[in-house]
Amino acid sequence: MAEKQKAKHEYIVPTKMINNPMIFGKFQRSQGYHTLIKFISRTSAALVNTTMHSEFEISPTVQSLIQLLDSLNEAIDQNAPEEQKPGAVRFGNPSYRKWFERMHEIVKDKLAIILADFPGAENEVCVYLCESFGNATRIDYGTGHETNFLAFLCCLDLVGVVNKNDDRALILALFQRYLILVRRLQLDYRMEPAGSHGVHSLDDYQFLCFLYGSIQLGSQGELQPADFPKQDVIDAHKDKYMFLQAIDFISKVKTGPFCEHSNMLWGVSACVLWDKVINGFMKMYKAEVLGKFPVMQHFYFGSLLRLEPMTHEFSRPI
């Protein structure tokens, strides 16, 4: 991004705008929606023919972002879950709220440094990152929070602090580190699944790891969809594939047969081709996450991701 463009762009603190179903109807025609979809497609393309062991360059900016997430992970140690009495509520350890406050402090301080060359950008971008770790009132986490992390990555690209050359590192290093962090949050603080449909949902908490992970598996050709529920396959290949890491996590936190506790994923394993799986996941993400008012009513819009209708003028705000 040119210096002239940086200087004239006015960043704003994002706000919630989807106040009712009628306004939500505008979202799928908006600049923000199409920008997110385009970013998913672009980062997905960067994962073709990769595994988690693939070599890629990590820029100083991406490395700083990884260190930010590492600091948030350390903050969990500093705000250890409280011991709760027998019979206490099933979900939600109050210590999460202390971690949440500390998270805001760390994010604000770190992003001010990372985005120092883009005055005002940190106030807009940090909202998406802070919203990506769950809700402190309900102590819950779901695919809407994960979508905020996607929006955070997308905004970094729109600002210009990262670019297309960073796509592989953004997903295989930074998003991967994010998944490790939020899985720990879910377990340590016993976070409630936000808006989960139980066995009728793909997963209680995540979605994008399955979409991105299926692209890895589909392009490698090493495994077929029918293979991923098999424990021996998971154990042998989970270090290589994001998808199998997600399946492994589910297998560890849920009890009973896979076909019962993860019926929708079990159904996915019946597909013959990964291309069908990938296309199905993309349609499902659009319908069940971006297409649901209860999820997207909590989304924020600013100068980078806008609710205005998609036009050529708004195709890229900066």
Image (spheres, rainbow, N blue to C red):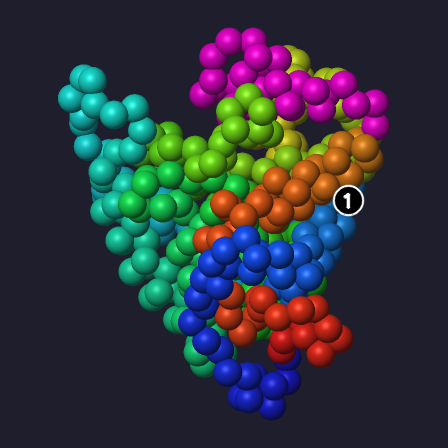
Q: Is residue 115 left or right of residue 158?
A: left
Tell me residue 109's x, y (percent): 34, 66
Tell me residue 76's x, y (percent): 30, 42
What's the residue type where badge 1 is placed? Val
**Secondary element at tag 1:** loop
Residue 252: in magenta span: yes
Q: Main secondary structure of the magenta part?
A: helix
Q: Quadrant of residue 166?
A: bottom right
What residue range appears in magenta? 247-273
Q: Is residue 109 left or right of residue 203?
A: left
Q: Residue furthest left?
A: 85
Locate the N terminus by quadrant: bottom right
Q: Is residue 91 left or right of residue 195?
A: left
Q: Measuring 32% from the left and 53% from the top, which residue is drawn there?
A: 103
Q: Quadrant of residue 38?
A: bottom right
Residue 257: in magenta span: yes
Q: Residues within 10 Å of mark 1 (few under 14, many from 20)?
A: some
Q: Measuring 23% from the left and 39% from the top, which residue is drawn there?
A: 95
Tell me residue 60's x, y (percent): 53, 64
Question: Where 68 falls versus 252 (above or below)?
Answer: below
Query: On the image, numbered disc 1 is attached to which residue?
Result: 48
Q: Measuring 70% from the left and 68% from the top, which residue is drawn there?
A: 310
Closest to the observer, 222 or 9 = 9
Tell me residue 86's x, y (percent): 18, 17
